[in-house]
Image (cartoon, rainbow, N blue to C red):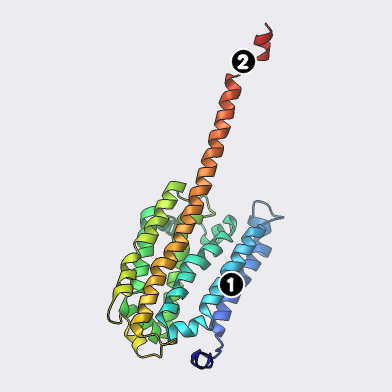
Amino acid sequence: MSALAAAFPAWEANPDVWLVVGLLAAAYVIAIVRLGPALAPDPRRPVTTAQVISFGLGIFATWLAADWPVHELAEDSLYSVHMVQHLTFTLVATPLLLMGTPGWMLRALLGGGRLLHAVRWLARFLPAVILYNLVLVVSHWPAVVDLTLRNGLAHFVAHVIIFVTALVVWLPVLSPLPEIPRLAPPLRMLYLFLQSVLPTVPASFLTFGKTPLYRYYESVDQLFGLSTVEDQRIAGLIMKVGAGFLLWTLIAVLFFRWYSEEEAASDRERRLNQTRDAPSPILETR
């Protein structure tokens, strides 16, 4: 235990992370107070309690993945932790932030011009699938990973791109705007299924590779007695199993919700037909 504590990174302040997370939280509160009364459908209740909780959890997940010790472990020791960091951004923090954003707030953010049209075009089935997997491949390309780990500005820009594109990619499933409609439930499930299958390709390279893909991690100290290749294999398993578990859990939730809604609609239609087919009391009396 003492050896592990000695190898574990010492606490380090990350004021840039605190600033970004603080600005994000402050912008949300200011938008509710200043813009909500004028733009929300119900000025007295611009956001719901569930939305505030979701956004708060999204802020917390963002901070947790970007601050100590995850940040230090990801940059200085373990690629597997780097993988957890990116998956937290794309599969946990961004959908929570989107679920916490009311439609009027997102509409005000996107405006009604080119930005809205660009986001609406990208948030369709095929463009969104291509966007997610393109960013996934590029962000795990050895040259890109080594560059972002050696250059602080490049690392920050990469995280911004991953974060913003993840928000766009989640819109077909969680969009609060009628201008950017959600996919129909069966298409949503197919969409998430593809997002869980295609990443298995880079995950396979990581899991079954016999040599390190990322030279940067050969030059740093590995924790827990792991070799660089072992750490890389763990990262591949996290990418395949961890991401797959989250996406398939969401697919299951969508399926059972869709099934319940279809059953409820069928029951209502059945009762309506029975009412129409029932003989009139007046006719029975005659």
Instruction: Specify the quadrant of the image occupied by residue 148.
Output: bottom left
**Mark identifier at residue 279:** 2
Which residue: 53% across, 93% down?
2
Picture coordinates of residue 41, whole percent (x, y) = 64, 51
Disc number at residue 60? Answer: 1
Q: Which residue lies furthest to the left in this view?
A: 210
Badge 1 element: helix
Horizontal and vertical percent position of residue 233: 35, 76
> Which residue of the protein is positioned furthest toward the right in this rendering?
44
Q: Nearer the viewer, residue 192 or 235?
A: 235
Q: Quadrant of residue 108?
A: bottom right
Picture mark count: 2
Query: What amino acid is found at the position of numbered circle 1 in the picture?
Result: Phe
Identify the residue at image location x=35%, y=74%.
140
Choose mark 2 or mark 1, whichever is in front: 2
Q: Which amino acid does label 2 sit on?
A: Pro
Relative vertical location of residue 158 with respect to residue 124 in this rendering, above or below: below
Q: How far apart are marks 2 and 1 (CA)?
A: 60 Å
